Image: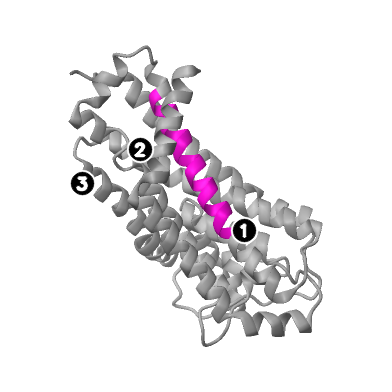
Amino acid sequence: MRGLMTVFGKELADDFTSWRFLILFAMVAVAGVFTLYIDSQNILAQAAESNQFIFLKLFTTADETLPGLLQFLNMMAVFFVPIVGIALGFDAINEERNSGTMSRLLSQPIYRDAVINGKFLAGVVTIAIMVTSIVLLVAGVGLRMIGVPPNSEEVIRLMLFLVVTIFYGAFWLGLSILFSIFFRRVATSALASIAVWIFLFFFMPMLAGIVANFMVPLEEAGTEVYLSNLGIQSAVLQVSPVRLYQEAISVILVPGARTLGQTIQILGVGGYRLIPNPLSLDQSLLLVWPHMVSLIALTAVCFAVSYIKFMKEEIRA
C-alpha cells in the first residue's frame, strides 16, 4: 500500500505540473465558458418559457445559429475527454522503460502491481478533478447568470454525468496505457491510441451503416424497413464507447428526451424533441444503466489486459 501511494503521489504531481495538462485544462475551460457566454441569451429565453430543470439548461441549451452547450458536450464526448485520457497515458510505461527509470524504480521495495495501479489511479483522479472543475466552473458562471439554484434531482443528474464522464475518460486512459505497454516507442503508442479514436468516431458509423444496409437493404421505402435498418445500426454502434457516452449523457442531462440514438435520428436532426412530461430520475437510470455498465466493463477490460501484460513483462536494466 505504501508503494502504491508513493507512485500515485508522484504521478499525480507530475500530471498537475506538466504543460500538457495545463494546456488541455485551459482549452476545455475556455471552450466551456465561451460557449456558455455565447448561448446566454438563449438560455435565459428558454428559462423564462419553462420552469422545469432550468439549471440543466445550462448544459443542454442549443441555438440554431451558434454552437450551444449541447454541442460542447458532444465535443467533450468526441474530442476533449479522449484526448485528455490519451495524453495522460500514452507514455506512462514505455517512456520510463526506454529511459531506464522503470528498472531503477522496480529495484526499490515497490511491488510491480503498485506501479501500474498507481499510474492508472493518478490518471483517473486527474481526469476526475479536471472534469469536475469544468462542470463547477460552468455551473457557477451560469448560476450567477440565471439566478436559479439547482434542485436535488438536477444535482444528482449532474453527479451522474460526472461519474459517466470519468469512466469514459478512464477507458481512454486504460487504452492508452495498454498501448504504452505493448509498444516500446512512445510515438507508436500515441498513434495507435489516436487511430482507435479516429476509427470509433469516423469509421464506426460507416461500418454500422454498411452492416445495416447489407442485412436490411433500403431498396423498398417504408417505415418498417427504415426502423429495422436504424435498429441494426444502433445495435452495432453499442460496442463503441463514444456512442455509449453520447446516449448516456443525452438521457441524463435532457430529462424530456425519452430517446436514445435511434429515436433521435427519427425525430429530426439538430436537436431533441422534448416531451412535455420529462422522465423521472429512476426511469432515466433504467435507460442509461446498460450504457454505464458497458463503459465500466470496457474500462475494466482495458486495464485488466494492461495489468496482466505488465506483470508478465520482463524489464531489464
Q: Secondary structure at mark 1?
A: helix
- Could you classify mark 3 by the number of other residues whose Cα lies within 10 Å: few (under 14), some (14-19), or many (20 or more)? few
Q: Magenta residues?
A: 115-135
Q: Which mark is residue 187?
A: 3
Please, what is the three-letter code of the amino acid marked with disc 3? Ala
Magenta stretch contains residue 77: no
Q: Residues within 10 Å of mark 1 (few under 14, many from 20)?
A: few
On the image, which quarter does residue 119 sit in? Answer: top left
Toward the viewer: 262 or 1?
Answer: 1
* Residue 43 sits above or below residue 109 on the image: below
**Secondary structure beneath label 3:** helix
Q: Is residue 314 above or below residue 266?
A: above
Given this view, does label 2 or label 1 mark the residue nearer the observer? 1
Q: Residue at x 77, y 56 (%)?
A: 281
Q: Is residue 171 left or right of residue 306?
A: right
**Above or below, comparing residue 37 to residue 161 in the picture:** below
Q: Which residue is mark 2?
A: 177
